[in-house]
Each structure stands twice: as C-alpha cells, then as structure tokens.
C-alpha cells in the first residue's frame, strides 16, 4: 500500500501563489504516474495536472500556464506550484498516484481557498 500525504493548502488572495506537496510512502512498486485533481463545492472531482516517471507533463486547459507540476523521484514527492490564482481555483486538491501494476492511490486532500 502507498500512503499519500498532501500539504501546502491555505487561503490566498486572487493573484497570489501557493505550493502544494504530496509525499508518498515507500512502496515495493514504482509509482509510474503522479497527478493532482481538485473538487470544488457541488462539482465532480476534476483532473488538474499529471507527471510521469519520465519527462511527460500535462495540464488541464484551465490551469495551463499558471500551474507547474514537478516531481522529486528520490524523495517520492510531487509538487504543484500554483501562480496567478483565481477564485475559481478554490477547491479541495487531491494527490493521485498510480503504481506499475496500475493500482490507484489517493491522498486525503488539502483545501485551497482563493479570495477575490
């Protein structure tokens, strides 16, 4: 089993920045992909960004150019740098990881609130 622990959420004014971190516990299987999702009140959980064990990264259109996903493979940690935050970015942000057997893991979520 892999445990994911998110940190870095909080309250920020529009235009500000936050950096989320997700630390994964050590696992016998490699984590081939790590991603961030978010869920706003009354909405379904939505994908935000993904990074693989290689160099592939991708972003949802709504955050491309403002958010940056990165990964420290040695520390088993993924980051989400969020700049130029907007009120519509307010959501609970969840970390997701997929191991090389295709099993999904989720963190407990961290709240991000952007005030206007």
Image (cartoon, helix red, strand yellow):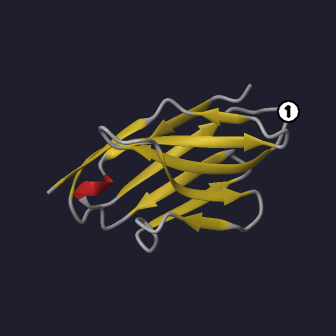
Going 31% across and 67% down the picture, which residue do you hit? 84
Q: Is residue 115 left or right of residue 92?
A: left
Left of 105 or right of it: where is 27? right
Task: In the rendered view, tell whether residue 106 sits above or below residue 77.
Answer: above
From the image, which quarter does the C terminus lie in? bottom left
Q: Residue 13: name its quadrant.
A: bottom left
The structure residue drawn at horizontal position 50% and vertical position 65%, both measured from the top left corner, is: 68
Instruction: Locate residue 103, reporting x and y percent.
Output: 76, 35
Looking at the rendered image, the quarter that the N terminus falls into is: top right
Secondary element under disc 1, as helix, strand or loop, is loop
Q: Image point 44% across, 46% down: which residue?
A: 38
The image shows residue 35 at horizontal and vertical percentages of: 60, 50
Quarter of the view holding residue 31:
top right
- Relative to the observer, which residue lies in front, 105 or 44? 44
Give the crowd class for mark 1: few <14, some 14-19, many >=20 residues within 10 Å. few
Q: Quadrant of residue 101?
A: top right
**Residue positioned most to the bottom:** 65
Give the tally of numbered discs: 1
Q: Nearer the viewer, residue 36 or 44?
A: 44
Q: Is residue 76 left or right of residue 107?
A: right
> Which residue is the site of mark 1?
28
| Residue 24 picture location, percent across and down | 65, 37
Which percent across, then down, holds residue 94?
A: 49, 40
**In the image, farthest residue toward the left:** 116
Going by the image, does 42 lie left or right of 71?
A: left
The residue nearer to you, when weighing 103 against 5, is 103
């Amino acid at each position: 089993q892999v445990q994911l622990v998110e940190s870095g959420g909080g309250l920020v004014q529009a235009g500000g920045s936050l950096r989320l971190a997700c630390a994964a516990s050590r696992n016998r299987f490699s984590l081939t992909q790590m991603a961030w999702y978010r869920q706003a009140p009354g909405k379904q959980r939505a994908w935000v960004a993904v990074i693989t064990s290689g160099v592939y990264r991708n972003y949802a259109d709504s955050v491309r150019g403002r958010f940056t996903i990165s990964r420290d493979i040695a520390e088993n940690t993924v980051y989400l740098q969020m700049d130029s935050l907007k009120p519509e970015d307010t959501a609970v942000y969840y970390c997701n990881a997929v191991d090389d057997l295709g099993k999904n893991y989720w963190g407990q979520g961290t709240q991000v609130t952007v005030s206007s």
